Amino acid sequence: MSIKLKVLFSFLMITALVFGFIQIYFPIENYSFERLHIFLFNLCTGGTILLYYTQGRVNVSKTVMLFFLGSLIYALSAFLKIYPVTILVSILLFVLVEKIRIEKFSFFPIHFFKSKESVSEKFHQASLLCLSTGLIMASLVILNNEYFKFVTMEKLTLNTFFLGFSFPLSLITLSLVFSSLKKIEGSSIKVIMEICFWAITLGVIIFFGFILFEKFIPQVFVTFALFFAVITVFFLYSKFAENIQQKSFLTSGIVFLIVTAVTGIAYIFFQMSPGYDPQKIKWLLHMHVFASLYGWNLCGLSVICRFDDFPIKLHSPTVIFIHWLTAIVLAPLGIFYGWFALLAVSGYSFITLTLFFSRNKGKF
């Protein structure tokens, strides 16, 4: 990836985190910086990197460039609540994502049902499908909530569906993880890998449905299923993946994913408790979100962006430690205390710039 792209993506990632804190300390009535926070990281940066990685070209294609520019318009129009523009742009973005997906795979995702197809490729196509589907579903929610009012549900909100744009990034990171396990796909372990694929992809969809209908007990069962699937992925990756530098970051990422599963389960149990007060466990929700976005997903995106550069010159344990300190401690505390927000942005800037710009020479 070129230096210009690395500068652009790292700038957007850092800016996204800044917007996450601006909403807390400098709120503007009727506008949510939280949306810019979500879009700049998940859609503008993550979505563009996903498409760029899928095409596998050195130079950015016109299709990817158009998606990036469209995603910026989408983010700004959704933030400013100019929803007709958001809907029109979402149609363009959907077409662009599907164009690249069909070129890479096929119109119908028949690869999901082929036992000989690698699990890594299945996760890759699932991430693209999740992105294009998410764009359409978000537009349908906008049409329903802002214009037609066909369905009235407490959880059927734009912000809930906008958060769904993190799922494609999670799936492409899992694709990277399973790409390191291709050497064991010819063994009986392939069955376990396939089960992990279906448990995670279907589990996320089913879980999202239970959130919308506020079914807490089913949420618990699905979350436990996802938790055990992630634990299985961690075991397979730790045992069978090649011991290269990327393994340190992706292993750390999987542990971040385990943390999101644990915090998710804990949050559901709090919701089910008699004296449930959202404000009292706000810290837990933010820890869950930061572990997912700036922990797990950042690991995957950084590996994609430096895919051809490894090994890179940095002290991995130090960077991983600062990464955990920032995502699990400083960023959640930054929601409540301004000084921690500054420390979180500083720590995250250090991590992002180090991962993106460390020289690709030297010993691991």
Image (tube, rainbow, N blue to C red):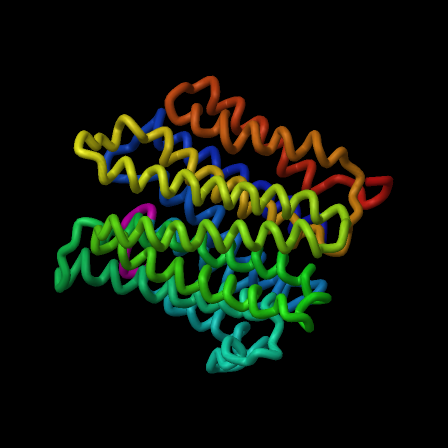
Q: Up-down: is 55 above or below 302?
A: below
Residue positioned 40% across, 50% down in the render: 224
Q: What is the x, y in percent for residue 346?
A: 57, 26
Q: What is the x, y in percent for residue 326?
A: 54, 29
Q: Determine whether, in the image, residue 340 is placed left or right of residue 249.
A: left
Q: Up-down: is 18 above or below 157?
A: above
Task: Quadrant for residue 58, please give it.
Answer: bottom right
Task: Quadrant for residue 64, please give it.
Answer: bottom right
Residue positioned 68% across, 62% down in the render: 181
Q: What is the x, y in percent for residue 277?
A: 22, 30
Magenta stretch contains residue 81 = yes
Q: Main secondary structure of the magenta part?
A: helix
Write down the region rendered in magenta. Answer: 79-86
Residue 89 in view here: no
Q: What is the x, y in percent for residue 206?
A: 33, 61
Residue positioned 66% across, 69% down in the render: 185
Image quarter (top left, top right, bottom left or bottom right) of the N terminus: bottom right
The foreground one among 74 and 24 is 24
The foreground one among 109 and 17 is 109
Residue positioned 33% across, 56% down in the render: 207
Q: Determine whether, in the image, residue 232 is placed left or right of residue 222.
A: right
Task: Quadrant for residue 153, please give it.
Answer: bottom left
Q: Determine whether, in the image, residue 59 is placed left or right of residue 336.
A: right
Q: Determine whether, in the image, residue 287 is placed left or right of residue 273.
A: right
Magenta stretch contains residue 185 = no
Q: Residue furthest front?
A: 188
Residue 332 in view here: yes
